[in-house]
Every structure is written in structure tokens, then in C-alpha cells.
Image: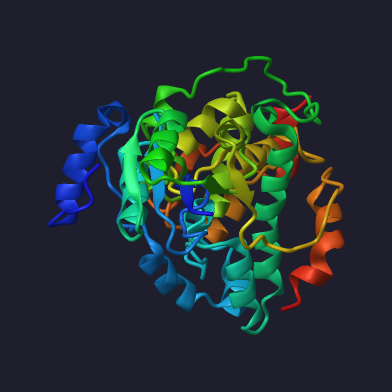
């Protein structure tokens, strides 16, 4: 299986070592300083940088590399996960804060913390 | 897009050309550099013990890791493990957990982060609620040295200390009666670490639409944690809207 990685702005680190990766700038509403910051992050990574529409650009990238699958990082952002679904991408939850399984009571932080505290404070 | 640049200035010029739609938000570029190298240099310096004791002070030992965490240059798992290897890490890990918590809420409600999660817990005296951020606030021209200073730093550097974010949000929402969404959008445009989860839900915490009560502050509190740097020489020190007791402020703002 030869994968390619779609890297998005919620996970700008390698998740499949050695696999070709692409990042696509959308029209985000970011200021210049945010765009420069993101661009600098990308320049330290082995990733092809594009701008435009995510889905067609990632599909074309995967086809160019003869990829059998597209891999991307999990994010809570519904828009980005919507693209992942459209792309049929495999979603990897890379290095979460704690491995505790949900569902969680998220009504207040204190309830959440009570549930994960022991695991969060253990190496 | 290009990957080779001879200098940062060349990169900045290229980004300006390629993304002209960003220019109406200003042409400032932060001193904070993107990338794993800069993140690791900061991670090395994190001192959980000093953080716990001083983080509420603007001059405190805060980590400055937020932009790298927001964009996943560093993972929350990684920074948690690094913290655990150092003494007195409980407070820092607890603060990292807030970011994880906001993300999980975002995962549950999605675009609902833009809507009030709950009814506000108090009613304001003034019914006026502005949908846009007033120009004097966004342009750092309120005459209040603290608020103008916070906005100037945000627009110039993409950074605002967490305590300053709370004071600013409280001022905008409760004193100026601006809808929190307008200020949240302004923050997302400029903050290097701006993300809809932490940002919007923190605004809602201040507004009491995701918390038990509105967050308020007074001059004594702000002066203490800023070491008085804004109040000294503030043009409005004589009629400071925050220079009162919490009881007075509460009565003035709420029914």
C-alpha cells in the first residue's frame, strides 16, 4: 500500500514517515503574520505546498504519485474532517493528549479533568 | 508554491503577492517563527514550577507554545510527557488539558462554537449589543492604555497573554456590550494560535454563555498582574472605568 499524506493546518508534523505529503492553503481569512507563520512551518517539512481547493488538489496529488490511499491526521474541526470523508482518507489520531476512551461529560471542564486527571499526570 | 527563499523578507514579499486578500488586515509580521526548530527551542525552556507560580503575570514564565500546539507542530501528548519529566508540573498539565477539553467540545458541537452554548447568567443594564467591534477598540484608540496596548501587541505580534485576553474580552463584552463573536473573529484573524475551539469557547466563558458567571476584573487586579505598566501614564487614569470595587462594577453593569 503506497500512501500519500494530506497535511492540514491542525496537524503540521509528519504522520507517515517517508510518504509524499501535500498541504493546501484555503482562503482562510488569516492575516499576513499568520500566513507567514504557517509557511515557515511548511518550509521545515518535506511537503508540497499548494493553494486553492483542497479536494481536487489532493486527489490530483495522490494520482500523480500513484497512491493507493490518502492518510490524514484527526482533528475536531468538522470542515477538515468533511474533506477527509470526501477524499475517502484514512484518519490517524496521532499522539492525543491522553488515550482515555470517551464518551466524556463535557458540560464543564472540572468534570472532564476529574475523569482524565490520573492518566494525564502519569507518564 | 515556492519552497526556496534567500531570506525571511523574500518569503514575506512572496506571501503578500500570493495572498493579497490578507493585506486589509495589516502588513505586520511576527517575530515568532514558525516551524519545529523554534518550537523545540521554546519547549526546552519550559519551566512548569515557575509557570505555576507566575503565569498570571504578564511578565510571568508562560510557555509561548500555543501557536505550535494550535497547528500541531507539537502534539499535546508530546508536551504533556515533556512536562511530566520536570518538577511541579500539575498546573501546566492542567492548562494543557483545557486545550484538549476545548477541542473535544468543538468536536461535539462543530460550528455551534459560534452560538451561545447557554443563556447568559446575568442581564446587562444596557440593552445595546453591538454586532461589530467598534473602531476605537480595533484601532487601539479607546484612550485606555491597557486595552489599546493589548490590541497593538495582538496586531503587531499575533500574541496576547492569556490574562490580557480575559481582561480584553470582559471589557469588550460587559463594558462595551459588543457581541462576543465580533471580538472572537478579530482574535482569529490575528492570533498566531487562533483556533475556533479555544478562542470562541474562552470568549463564551467570559460572557457566561459557557460558564457559571460573567468574568469581571477591576483596576487593582489588572494593575497587579501587569506590574502597573499600563496604568502609569494612562490618559484615562483619572476616569478609569475599572477603578472600582467588584461590587460597584457588578451593580453598574448588571441588573
Q: Residue B68 location, x and y as percent?
A: 47, 58
Question: Would you say B96 lies left or right of B59 here?
Answer: right
In depth, the one of B235 and B28 nearer the eye is: B28
Q: Which residue lies furthest to the top in this view?
A: B128
Residue B234 seen in this snapshot? no
Q: Is residue B29 left or right of residue A45?
A: left
Residue at left 60%, top 29%?
Answer: B180
Q: Quadrant of the N terminus of chain B?
A: top left
- Residue B27 in percent (x, y) is at 25, 38
**Image label count:** 0
> Where is the C terminus of chain B found, in terms of image quarters?
top right
**Residue B57 figure quarter:** bottom right
- At horizontal 46% and vertical 50% (from top left) the residue drawn is A4
> Between residues B127 and A69, which one lies in front from this camera angle?
A69
**Residue found at x 67% / y 46%:** B103
Q: Position of residue B131 (x, y in %)?
A: 55, 17
* B130 relative to B234, above or below: above
Q: Is residue A65 visible?
A: yes
Measuring 57% from the left and 62% from the top, which residue is drawn there? Answer: B75
Reply above or below: A100 against B50: above
Q: Nearer the viewer, residue B2 or B81?
A: B2
The foreground one among B21 and B245 is B21
Q: Where is residue A80 in the image (x, y as percent from the top left)?
A: 56, 36
Residue B25 location, quadrant: top left
The image's colour scheme reads rainbow
Q: Is residue A87 left or right of residue A40?
A: right
Amino acid at each position: 500500500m503506497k500512501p500519500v499524506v494530506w497535511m492540514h493546518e491542525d496537524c503540521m508534523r509528519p504522520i507517515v514517515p517517508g510518504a509524499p505529503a501535500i498541504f493546501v492553503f484555503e482562503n482562510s481569512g488569516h492575516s499576513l503574520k499568520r500566513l507567514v507563520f504557517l509557511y515557515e512551518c511548511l518550509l521545515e517539512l518535506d511537503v508540497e505546498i499548494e493553494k486553492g481547493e483542497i479536494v481536487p488538489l489532493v486527489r490530483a496529488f495522490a494520482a500523480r504519485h500513484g497512491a493507493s490511499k490518502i492518510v490524514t491526521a484527526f482533528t475536531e474541526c468538522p470542515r477538515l474532517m468533511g474533506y477527509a470523508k470526501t477524499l475517502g482518507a484514512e484518519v490517524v489520531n496521532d499522539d492525543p493528549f491522553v488515550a482515555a476512551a470517551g464518551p466524556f461529560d463535557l458540560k464543564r471542564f472540572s468534570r472532564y479533568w476529574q475523569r482524565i486527571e490520573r492518566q494525564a499526570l502519569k507518564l | 508554491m515556492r519552497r526556496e527563499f534567500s531570506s525571511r523578507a523574500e518569503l514575506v514579499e512572496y506571501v503578500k503577492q500570493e495572498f493579497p486578500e490578507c493585506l486589509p488586515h495589516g502588513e505586520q509580521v511576527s517575530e515568532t517563527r514558525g516551524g519545529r526548530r523554534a518550537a523545540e527551542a521554546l519547549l526546552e525552556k519550559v519551566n512548569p514550577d515557575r509557570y505555576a507560580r507566575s503565569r498570571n503575570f504578564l511578565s510571568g514564565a508562560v510557555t509561548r507554545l500555543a501557536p505550535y500546539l494550535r497547528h500541531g507542530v507539537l502534539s499535546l501528548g508530546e508536551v504533556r510527557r515533556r512536562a511530566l519529566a520536570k518538577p511541579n508540573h500539575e498546573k501546566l498539565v492542567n492548562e494543557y488539558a483545557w486545550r484538549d477539553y476545548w477541542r473535544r467540545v468543538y468536536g461535539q458541537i462543530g460550528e455551534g462554537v459560534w452560538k451561545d452554548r447557554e443563556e447568559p447568567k446575568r442581564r446587562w443594564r444596557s440593552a445595546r449589543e453591538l454586532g461589530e467591534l467598534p473602531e476605537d477598540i480595533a484601532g487601539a484608540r479607546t484612550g485606555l492604555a491597557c486595552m489599546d496596548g493589548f490590541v497593538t501587541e495582538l496586531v503587531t505580534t499575533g500574541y496576547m497573554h492569556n490574562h490580557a485576553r480575559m481582561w480584553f474580552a470582559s471589557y469588550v463584552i460587559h463594558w462595551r456590550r459588543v457581541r462576543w463573536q465580533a471580538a472572537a473573529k478579530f482574535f482569529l484573524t490575528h492570533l498566531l494560535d487562533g483556533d475556533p475551539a479555544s478562542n470562541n469557547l474562552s470568549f463564551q466563558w467570559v460572557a457566561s454563555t459557557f460558564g457559571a458567571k460573567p468574568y469581571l476584573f477591576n483596576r487593582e487586579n489588572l494593575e497587579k498582574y501587569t506590574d502597573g505598566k499600563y496604568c502609569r501614564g494612562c490618559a484615562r487614569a483619572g476616569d478609569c472605568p475599572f477603578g472600582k470595587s467588584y461590587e460597584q462594577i457588578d451593580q453598574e453593569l448588571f441588573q
